[in-house]
Image (cartoon, helix red, strand yellow):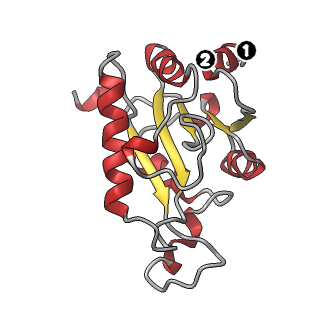
Amino acid sequence: MEFISKIKKPSVFLDRDGVVNVDKGYVYRVEDFEWISGSREAIQFFKNKRYHVFIVTNQSGITRGMYSEEDVMNLHQYINNELKKINTFIDDFFYSPYHPEIKNDKYKNLAHLRKPNTGMLELANNKWNIDKSKSLMIGDKQSDLVCAKSFGIDGFLFKGNNLLDFVKKINF
């Protein structure tokens, strides 16, 4: 078992709002969460190809006082509970509560986590055995692509519609 855990695996880093779910602005409640078409199936597609699947999401609503870290963690648990219904899951969730325009001393030491910085990807890399040469990131903003490039992986800009169709067009 120890040997298996040291095998590096390709990974996909998915932005959350705008890639996995419809970006309605500060989504933190289950009742506001709406899956992007094909996103569940895209996650299942990557898991079937033996990829780690991670969510990396900026969540400045926390530092703005709009919702709590517990709210974000509860929503992420809901996401995985829903994915279990189709026999798949997200391996891990990473989020950044920091925002440079909001003064909040509690989160200022987490500036390195906020995309386009690579902090969330570095956390994943330190926790999981990631094969960066075969990994990729899918986001809906330029900051996601900058983050991917800075981390040394390919980044792909998703502009909406169906995530599974988008993923199937990627050459990997």
Q: Is residue 2 toward the left or the right of residue 110 in the image?
A: left
- How many numbered marks appear? 2
Q: Is residue 100 toward the left or the right of residue 48 in the image?
A: right
Indicate the position of residue 6 as horizontal and vertical percent values.
Answer: 36, 34
What secondary structure is marked by label 2? helix
Gap in angstroms between the C-alphas marked 1 and 2: 9 Å
- Identify residue type, mark 1: Lys
- Identify residue type, mark 2: Leu
Q: Pick out the residue farthest to the left.
A: 1
Q: Earlier in the sequence, mark 1 or mark 2?
A: 2
Name the residue rendered at 48%, 86% in the picture: 105
Foreground residue among 171 and 163: 163
- The image quadrant of residue 170 is top right
Q: Pick out the residue farthest to the front.
A: 31
Name the residue rendered at 63%, 40% in the picture: 18
Q: Is residue 73 toward the left or the right of residue 109 in the image?
A: left
Neighbor class of circle 2 (other Cα within 10 Å; few <14, some 14-19, many 20+) is some
Tell me, for residue 164, which label it has, or none. Answer: 2
Quarter that holds the N terminus? top left
Q: Is residue 5 visible?
A: no
Name the residue rendered at 48%, 47% in the picture: 125
Quarter that holds the C terminus? top right
Q: Is residue 86 visible?
A: yes
Tell me, for residue 20, which label it has, or none. Answer: none
Tell me, for residue 169, which label it has, or none. Answer: 1
Does 32 appear above or below 163?
Answer: below
Indicate the position of residue 91 as horizontal and vertical percent values.
Answer: 38, 35
Please tell me whether mark 1 or mark 2 is closer to you in this view. 2
What secondary structure is marked by label 1? loop
Name the residue rendered at 29%, 28% in the picture: 3
